[in-house]
């Protein structure tokens, strides 16, 4: 039996994807420049080869952070059952043996730098892949029934990366979600990412619908607070507002509007209901409530 045939398929796939050379991401470059002051490819190369550099471990984790392309390739090799600890250990041993150094591209057209990768770095890399995470059988089944093969793989990767533990209520929610959402929409995958984070934030509740509605109302309240502040700021200045005790909301307006849009979409598509707002009118006491009759009121106003 050849050495290739005896190696774990996932390890072979990882090696095939890494051998052409890993690209330095923007996050890795920014971290290197801010932490070390090194900006040229030559200085960055010397930094990556210096195993005594205290910041090298963090940079190596950024370089080896698995991207979506790598995860999709690996997902095709994973069975519906999660890989057990022994399977992950075999992959770890294989990578440590065959990839003690990882090629990193510092500039286009240049020869890659072979950066040392220790055993701990490969273990952290495998932990991020979450190979031993078991997706519920019901979830896998409904993904296959509602999505084509390509979209199903991408959705599986997103669920594998999520912190969410699917309950029976979640399975019912996802069944309606994937049955009614339009996969061709440009907002489909951002909305799915948002929804996964939303359900993880909500946790275990009696009613997902009520919890999502409550989140929608909180977002609307935050948006109103932000718009009220912008209205006051446009007619005053920051110093005056600070003296009046007005605090600046630390909210990204664009992200807040996007979240509201996603929440409205979820409520309409999954639960078939629009967002409900507090329709009670706002009243302001002008001090005339105790006046009797129009004559007394007119006198007070004048």
Image: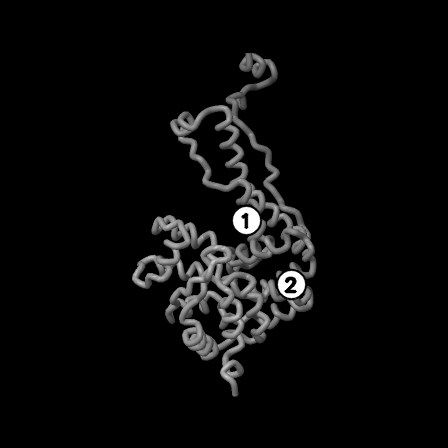
Q: Is residue 196 left or right of 115 when viewed as pictured?
A: right
| Quadrant of the image occupied by residue 52 | bottom left
Nearer-the-camera pick, 251 or 115: 115
The residue tagged with tag 1: helix, strand or loop? helix
Q: In this view, does 295 lie above or below 248?
A: above
**Residue 142, percent from left and from top:** 65, 67
Lower position in the chain sequence, tag 1 or tag 2: 2
Nearer-the-camera pick, 289 or 196: 196
**Residue 266, percent from left and from top:** 63, 52
In the picture, the disc for residue 159 is: none
Which of labels 1 and 2 is toward the front?
2
Q: Is residue 212 above or below residue 144?
A: above
Q: Can the viewer see residue 166?
A: no
Q: Distance between the residues labelled 1 and 2?
A: 28 Å
Mark 2 Cα-neighbour bin, 10 Å: few <14, some 14–19, many ≥20: some
Q: Mark 2 points at which residue?
A: 151
- Which color scheme did the rendering employ for the protein? one colour
Nearer-the-camera pick, 191 or 120: 120
Q: In this view, does 90 lie above or below 196?
A: below
At x 48% / y 78%, what residue is drawn?
87
Quarter of the figure that contains the C terminus: top right
At x 63% / y 51%, what residue is drawn?
187
In the picture, the disc for residue 215 is: 1
Mark 1 Cα-neighbour bin, 10 Å: few <14, some 14–19, many ≥20: some
The residue tagged with tag 2: helix, strand or loop? helix
**Residue 39, percent from left and from top:** 39, 49
**Residue 238, percent from left and from top:** 43, 28
């Amino acid at each position: 039996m050849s050495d290739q045939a005896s190696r774990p398929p996932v390890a072979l796939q990882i090696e095939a994807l890494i051998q052409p050379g890993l690209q330095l991401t923007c996050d890795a470059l920014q971290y290197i420049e801010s932490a070390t002051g090194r900006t040229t490819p030559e200085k960055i190369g010397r930094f990556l080869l210096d195993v005594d550099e205290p910041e090298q471990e963090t940079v190596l984790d950024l370089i080896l952070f698995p991207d979506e392309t790598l995860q999709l390739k690996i997902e095709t090799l994973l069975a519906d059952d999660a890989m057990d600890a022994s399977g992950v250990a075999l992959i770890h041993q294989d990578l440590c043996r065959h990839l003690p150094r990882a090629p990193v591209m510092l500039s286009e057209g240049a020869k890659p730098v072979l950066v040392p990768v220790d055993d701990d770095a490969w273990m952290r890399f495998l932990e991020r892949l979450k190979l031993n995470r078991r997706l519920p059988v019901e979830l896998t089944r409904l993904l296959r029934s509602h999505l084509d093969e390509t979209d199903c793989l991408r959705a599986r990767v997103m669920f594998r990366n999520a912190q969410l533990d699917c309950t029976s209520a979640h399975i019912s929610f996802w069944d309606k979600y994937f049955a009614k959402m339009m996969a061709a929409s440009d907002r489909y995958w951002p909305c799915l990412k948002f929804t996964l984070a939303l359900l993880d934030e909500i946790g275990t509740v009696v009613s997902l619908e009520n919890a999502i509605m409550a989140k929608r109302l909180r977002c609307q309240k935050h948006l109103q607070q932000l718009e009220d502040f912008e209205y006051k700021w446009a007619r005053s200045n920051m110093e005056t507002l600070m003296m009046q005790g007005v605090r600046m909301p630390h909210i990204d307006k664009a992200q807040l509007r996007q979240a509201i849009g996603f929440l409205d979409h979820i409520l309409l598509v999954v639960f078939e209901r629009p967002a409900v707002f507090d329709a009670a009118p706002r009243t302001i006491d002008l001090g005339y409530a105790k006046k009797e009759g129009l004559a007394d009121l007119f006198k007070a106003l004048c």
